[in-house]
Amino acid sequence: MTRPKIVILGAGYGGLITSKSLEKLLKSGEADVTLINKHDYHYLTTQLIKTGAGTAADRQIALSIPELINSSKTHFLKAAVSTVDIKKQEVHLEDGNTVPYDYLLIALGFEVDTFGVPGVKENAFEIRSFRSSKAIYHHIIKQFNLYKEDHDPSRLTFVVAGGGFTGIEMLGELADGLPKLCKQHDIPFEKIRIVAVEAAPSVIPFFPKQSILYTTLVLEKRNIELITGRKMLECTPEKIRLENNIDIPTRTLIWSCGVKGNTIVQNWGLPIEKGKIPVDACLRVKNMKNVFSIGDCSLFMKDEKNALPPTAQVALQQAPVCAKNIVATLRGETLKPFEYHHKGSVASLGLMAAVGKVGNFRLSGLFGAFMKQVIEARYLFNLGGPALIIKQHFGVSREPVKVTAKQ
């Protein structure tokens, strides 16, 4: 008798944790599980800002997938998905191969939303993947080298658009990383200009006033210019233009103003709402019994009007429930509705400070930074136990990760 085939598309937070959960839930020989990802590493999305600023080794952010899974229970396939044939229950890969499935999980993550601002797609850098974040670091090094030739101050002006969590974390990492790069290239740090641009009246506008004030003070103390209440109108290779005819000469715009679901799923014959795949209470794609979707490319409505945000926390909570529901479907058992419980949020402002809110408690300063480290360590523990935590902090390889243009 042929064993049921479970195929997982994407090895981000949602896809990888689902596969790890299936390894524990499935009985020996009960099903074949295939995890498909376009590269052989799983990157810590919430830590990509460190890759962009060069404040962490590659392998602290990009973890080898074969080392994280149990190869006797999960088959890993390094490949890029082209399309999915829902009627034939087949996944078509860019290399021409086809992978059949009985149960499918779509966890393909997000794309950056440029909101139609002219020039952003062509000229800005994105914190979207390990490769795109690594490109930021290489570009910064290039600008340092070119500055020594032409002394153009725009080469040392680094602009971060977006004052949400990712934006302020990127600012903190730049403030940590750029002084070291200045020493390496013999350039005075005083010549560096770090600029934050946010259309709202303040950074992290969704946080309490005290947290906004603290964040603002920390960033300004670190010589970061804050330009708030100004929308960006245009981005060219040499400058950005804001409202009220404000021009900032720069060769580096890092865009962190929002995300949208992966557009690759929109031509697969799936239901699409608000650019994402709508799912029911049990994380199944609407009107489908054997196709599931979680994470940033799925649309889970927490009430009649509001959807869950595209955050790592949501994907990490969805994954184990999704795994249980896939197994329940396979066994003909009752599925479990997903319930999201917000556990708080913490954003780093560099290595020595963070800001956050957990329940009714506001976090800031060194304690906030410590809690941020605890959160990251907890995820590593879930992936590989204490051994992985120790390896990532003390025994990580310093060899750079090889990336290609298609990644």
Image (cartoon, rainbow, N blue to C red):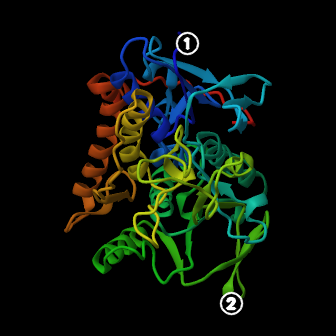
Quadrant of the drawing holding the C terminus: top right
Element type where label 2 sits in the image: helix
Q: Quadrant of residue 387?
A: top left
- Measured as percent of width and height from the top left, residue 348 is found at 37, 56
**First in sequence: mark 2 vs mark 1:** 1
Name the residue type under label 2: Asn
- 289 and 264: which is toward the camera: 289
Mark-to-mark CA distance, 2 and 1 = 66 Å
Are circles 2 and 1 on residues that touch, CB within 8 Å?
Answer: no
**Which of the two marks, 2 or 1, is nearer to us in this view?**
1
Residue at point 42%, 68% (across, down): 219
- Label 1 crowding class (10 Å Cα cut-off): few <14, some 14-19, many 20+? few
Q: Residue furthest bottom?
A: 244
- 357 and 319: which is toward the camera: 319
Element type where label 1 sits in the image: loop
Q: In the image, is 340 to the left or to the right of 125?
A: left
Q: In the image, is 320 to the left or to the right of 260?
A: left
Check residue 2 in the rendering and tell me which mark sits there, or answer none.
Answer: 1
Name the residue type under label 1: Thr
**Residue on which disc 2 sits:** 244
- Measured as percent of width and height from the top left, residue 362 is found at 23, 67
Q: Is residue 400 visible?
A: no
Question: Is residue 167 shown above or below 398?
Answer: below
- Label 2 crowding class (10 Å Cα cut-off): few <14, some 14-19, many 20+? few
- Measured as percent of width and height from the top left, residue 276 is found at 60, 57
- Measured as percent of width and height from the top left, residue 2 is found at 55, 12
- 295 and 214: which is toward the camera: 295
